[in-house]
Image (tube, rainbow, N blue to C red):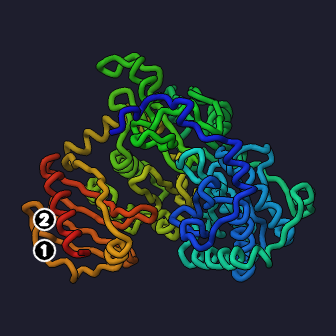
Amino acid sequence: MASRAGTVALPQDLVDITALLDAYFDVAPDLGDPAQRVAFGTSGHRGSSLKASFNEPHILAITQAIVEYRGRQGITGPLFIGRDTHALSEPAQNSALEVLAANGVTVLVDARHGYTPTPALSHAILKYNREAGAGTPQADGIVVTPSHNPPGDGGFKYNPPHGGPADTDATGWIADRANQLLENGLRGVKRMPLNDALAAETTGKFDFLSSYVDDLPSVLNLNAIREAGVRIGADPMGGASVDYWGEIGERHQLNLTVVNPTVDPQWAFMTLDWDEKIRMDCSSPSAMASLIKRMSDSTGSSGAGSAFDIATGNDADADRHGIVTPDGGLMNPNHYLAVAIDYLYRNRSGWNPNSVVGKTLVSSSIIDRVAAGPGRKLVEVPVGFKWFVPGLLSGEGAFGGEESAGASFNKLDGSVWTTDKDGILLALLASEITAVTGKSPSQLYKGLTDQFGAPVYARIDAAATREQKSKLGKLSAADVTATSLAGEEITAKLTEAPGNGASIGGLKVVTENAWFAARPSGTEDVYKIYAESFKGADHLKQVQEEAKALVDGVIA
C-alpha cells in the first residue's frame, strides 16, 4: 500500500488540463508504436493524449470506422452519443459529431448539454428499439468515457443495437479499419466543422436523464425505499451521475442526499488510490476514503447514529457501484453481488423462474453456493460484460455481474433494463434491500457466510514477458499436469468458460474449497492471479504461491 493512498490529492498529483487538451489536437500518433494505435479492450479504446494514444486522429478514424461498420450491418436508425466528465470526453464527442454529421448519420445528443452515464445510454438504445419494433431501423450508440481511469485518460466505446458492449467481431473490425484510416493519413474520413455538425438536420437531442430516471419504478421497488424512509447518501465522485442522483431523489421523493456535487476535470477533491494515482474506482477503499470516513465519523461502534442508512459511490460513467454500510463500511464487490443475487431471486416473482445467474469466472465462488441454495443454475463466463448481453435481452439470464463492481438485472416483469453495467441501479438496490429486509447488505452477507462459509479473495500480479503472456493466453488444460493445489485435489482445469465454452484467455484451476485464475494483462508485462479460499487467509496464501509456481512452470 502506497504511503499516501486514501489521502486527498495534492497539486503535484493533478493533470495539466491545458496540456492535455492541447495534446489532443496537436499530437499525432506514431503508428510504429503499438501503444499509439487503435486497440479495443473489453471497454473500448482507451488512452491519453499526453501519451499519443487518445488524440483527435484516433477519434476521427474510429468514428468513421463505426459509420462504415453500422452501414455494413444495415444499422440505419439514430445513433445515441453521450460523454462523461473526463476532460478529453467533450472534445472527443465533438470530433465524433463532425464525422457522424458529415456522413449523414442521425445523431441524438443530450438535450441538457450535460453528462450521460453509460447505463442511461444503454437504456435509451433498448427503449428506442423496443418501441420502434421489429423490422424498423434500429438505433445504436457511442459512449465517450474511460470509466474509472485517471483524469488524464480518454475512452471511446461502441454499443450496437443490443445496447451492450460490442463483441470482439465488431471491435476487431472497427479497430482494424480505424488503423487503416490512420495509416492512410485519414483519407476516407468525412468531416465537417463542428458548428455545421451541431446545426445539421441529422443532429437532434434526447433527454437521457428523464428517460432513465422516470423508468426506474419498472425495475426497483422505490415505494419500499420511500415508505421505509431509507436515508441515502449518493456520491457521484465527480462523474456523469451527478445530475441524476438529485433528480432521482426529487422525482421519486426519496430521502436522498447528493454527498458531493462537484465536477472537476482534475478531480482535485479525490483521495488517492492504492498506487497514489487519482482513479474513480468506487470499489477501492482508498478512492472511496472520503465517503467511508463520512459514514464512520457519524457512526458509533454499533452502527447507530449514522448520517445514512446506505451510502453509495459511482465511477465517472456510473457503470460501477460502491456500497457503504454503517456496520460494515465499504463492501467487497463480490460480497455485495452475492447479497444482491440472493435477494433478487427471492423477491422478483415476475422473472422467468428458470432464469440463470450470470457471473464472470474470476468472481467469488460464494455466488455459486448462493445460487445453488434456491436451486438456480449458474452460468460462468469469461471476463467482459458483453457475455451477459444475450441472457439479459431474453430474460433467460436476469442478472449478470462481475467482480469489478459491475452488474445489471432485469425489470420487475423480467424484461430487459440495460445490457451494460448499471452502477446507479445496483446502488439503489442496496436501499431497496435495506427497506424490505430491515437489514443492511453487509449484515445479510454475514448471514450468507454463516450458511455457506466465508471466502477469502485476493488478486496479485506476477511478472511475465510478452511471449510468456501469449503462451498463457493459449494454454490448454492438457498443459497442466499438476493433480493437487494447496493440499486439495484439483477438480477442474479450465481454459474455456464452462457457461458458454468461450476462451478465457488464460487458466482457471479449481478444488473443493479454493480456486485460482491466471490471465495475462493487456497493458503491462504481468499476468494477474485471482485466487480464493474458503479455508482462511493462510490457505489463500498457499494457493497463490502454488498458483504462481504452477503457471510459471507451464509458460517458462
Expressed as whole percent of the image width and height from the top left, the position of residue 287 reads 45, 37
Neighbour tally class for label 1: few under 14, some 14-19, many 20 plus, Cα within 10 Å: few
SS of the residue at dot 2? strand
Q: Quadrant of the N terminus?
A: top left
Q: Name the residue nearer the viewer: 375 or 69.
A: 69
Residue receiving disc 1 = 482
Instruction: Determine whether label 2 and label 1 are within 8 Å by CB.
Output: yes
* Position in image of residue 381 (x %, y %): 39, 68
The answer to whether residue 105 shows anywhere in this view is yes
Please name the residue shown 38% across and 77% down the image.
503
- In the image, 60 versus 97, the foreground residue is 60
* Depth check, front residue: 78 or 413: 78
Which of the labelled discs sits on residue 485, or is there none?
Answer: 2
Residue nearest the observer in this picture, 81 or 188: 188
Determine whether 257 is above or below 221 in the image.
above
Tell me the residue at 39%/37% (across/down). Answer: 285
Left or right: where 150 falls relative to 212: left
Q: CA distance from mark 2 to mark 1?
A: 8 Å
Please tell me in which quadrant of the rendered image residue 491 appears: bottom left
Q: Is residue 237 above or below residue 102?
A: above
